[in-house]
Image: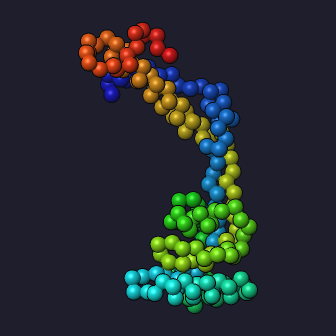
Amino acid sequence: ETLLGREVVTPTPNLDECQRYYDNNPGEFLSGDLVHARHILFQVTKATPIPEIRAKAEQTLNGLLANPERFAEVARELSNCPSGQQDGNLGQISRGDMVPEFEAALFRLAPTGLLPEIVKTRFGFHIISVDRRIPGEKMPFDMVRAKIEKRLIGKVEEKAIRQYISVLAAQAKIEGIDLEAASSPLVQ
């Protein structure tokens, strides 16, 4: 690291370069999507008959589709998750908080309300209600400038180290292997 720090000098990006990167890569600077959701879990364990549990979950979902206002009551009565005692409330959820199958169902671009299908995960069968969706928003430049600067420095540093190693390889006397060495220190 000491050698590279001395031999490989990388410039620090200025404000304009950071702003240009921010403007050209808007998708990288979004705050995460959030949902407020509730669920009812029909837990699957080694001793439970899966077809019967799935049938019970389907029957419960059909009943809730006809009477969605009963969700809290049914969650308290039937859910195998501790959240059942809080009407099935899972609170505010962001991407990465749940297992992939559950998350895919939550963040699918659909309206709010009771999802019309059972969601199967390694924990069991879930009936899910999405109460509110909060889409991600573009974060202000000032909030992400340090992150952008770090990313740009990293890119330049990586390229500079590759070039430095390439120049060193060109100066070495190695036979039997092509190191893609640069013949000039003026590497682009």
Compared with residue 158, is residue 82 higher up or lower down, i.e. above or below? below
* Residue 30 coordinates in the image, percent (x, y): 64, 48
Q: Which residue is depicted at the point 74% across and 67% down? A: 111
Q: Which residue is depicted at the point 67% across and 54% down? A: 136
Q: Would residue 131 appear left or right of 179 to someone viewing this image?
A: right
Q: Which residue is depicted at the point 28% across and 13% down? A: 172
Tell me the quadrant of the picture where the N terminus can be found. top left
Residue farthest to the bottom?
A: 77
| Depth check, front residue: 147 or 164 | 164
Compared with residue 184, is residue 54 higher up or lower down, i.e. above or below? below
Residue 133 appears in which quarter of the rendering? Answer: bottom right
Compared with residue 32, is residue 29 higher up or lower down, i.e. above or below? above
* Residue 138 coordinates in the image, percent (x, y): 68, 47
Can the viewer see residue 84?
A: no
Compared with residue 105, is residue 51 higher up or lower down, i.e. above or below? below
Q: Which residue is depicted at the point 71% across and 83% down? A: 65
Q: Would residue 140 appear left or right of 180 to someone viewing this image?
A: right
* Residue 27 coordinates in the image, percent (x, y): 65, 44
Residue 116 appears in which quarter of the rendering? Answer: bottom right
